[in-house]
Image (cartoon, helix red, strand yellow):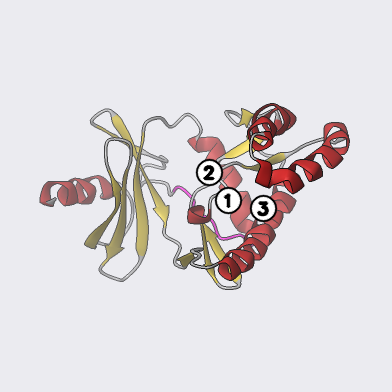
Amino acid sequence: MRNKRQKIIDIAKKWSIPPIKETVKIKDDKYKFVYKIICIDHTEYLFKSRNNVEKIGTEEELLLYIDNNKIPTSIPLRTKDDCLFVPYQNKYYVLYKFINGNHIRCKSIQEYKDAIQIYGSIIGRFHRVLKSYNGKSENISDMNLSSQIFDWALPILEKQSKYTKIRKVISEIKDDMLERNFQKCTRNEFFENFKTTRPRLVGSRKQTIVSV
């Protein structure tokens, strides 16, 4: 653990941040290396490994656009050398501003109902902002939304009798959906990727943007 802490401290020197007081593990396995950094002045950052950085330039511009449109977002910070990442032992390391808040967690049906309302408003805000984004779009994946819904999701739902109402709604809007022009949207729409101070969104921890 001490060696990992020292590795983080050594790599983090590439950024213009205060000396590090503490590192807190968020995820550390063969797939992800994610730590929260707490500096001596109490500022906080998110330190992450990435297997590739092909998308990071596009990611920076797009996330800055979202953040400037009043949706607080974790944005990759530039190093002292004006780079967005630091290569180290066949991996790339990126530093993000840390967003405080609470993940949406539900312990009852009523809490799920409340969460869905918050969640729906959050996704709606993202999509309204992304609709007007005209910046970099290199390396943004193209997803065929109609195929995702009608060729993948709907067949799964059709095997579950309890989802009759959902199948009916999807069938009713199918023609309308196929006629629409789609836009960029968020793909990783999981509760754990958003933080709130209920009932207000305080930040997006991680988003994968795709074009549909």
Read off the residue under disc 1: 64
- The picture places residue 21, in percent across and down from the top left corner, at 21, 64
| Relative to 103, 29 lies left or right | left
What residue appears at the point 32 percent right and 36 percent down from the top-left corner?
31
Position in image of residue 149 (x %, y %)? 70, 34
At label 2, the amino acid type is Glu
Residue at left offset 84%, top offset 41%: 173
Q: Which of marks 3 and 1 is nearer the N terminus?
A: 1
- For label 3, the residue is 126
Relative to 148, is 35 above or below?
below
Distance (Cα) linking label 3 and label 2: 16 Å
The extreme front residue here reads: 161
Cβ–Cβ under 8 Å for marks 3 and 2: no
Tag 2 and tag 1, C-beta contact below 8 Å: yes
According to the picture, the residue beneath numbered tag 2 turns out to be: 60
Instruction: Judge whether residue 160 is colored magenta.
Output: no
Compared to 60, does 151 lie above or below? above
Cα distance in 3D space between marks 2 and 1: 6 Å
Viewer-proximal residue among 164 and 42: 164
SS category of the residue bearing label 1 = helix
Q: Which of marks 3 and 2 is nearer the N terminus?
A: 2
Name the residue: 55% across, 44% down: 188
Question: What residue is rendered at 86% in x and 41% in y?
Answer: 172
Q: Residues within 10 Å of mark 1 (few under 14, many from 20)?
A: some
Q: Which amino acid does label 1 sit on?
A: Leu
Give SS at disc 3.
helix
Asked whether the beta carbons under mark 3 and mark 1 sit within 8 Å of each other, the answer is no
User: Where are the magenta residues, as a range?
Assistant: 70-76
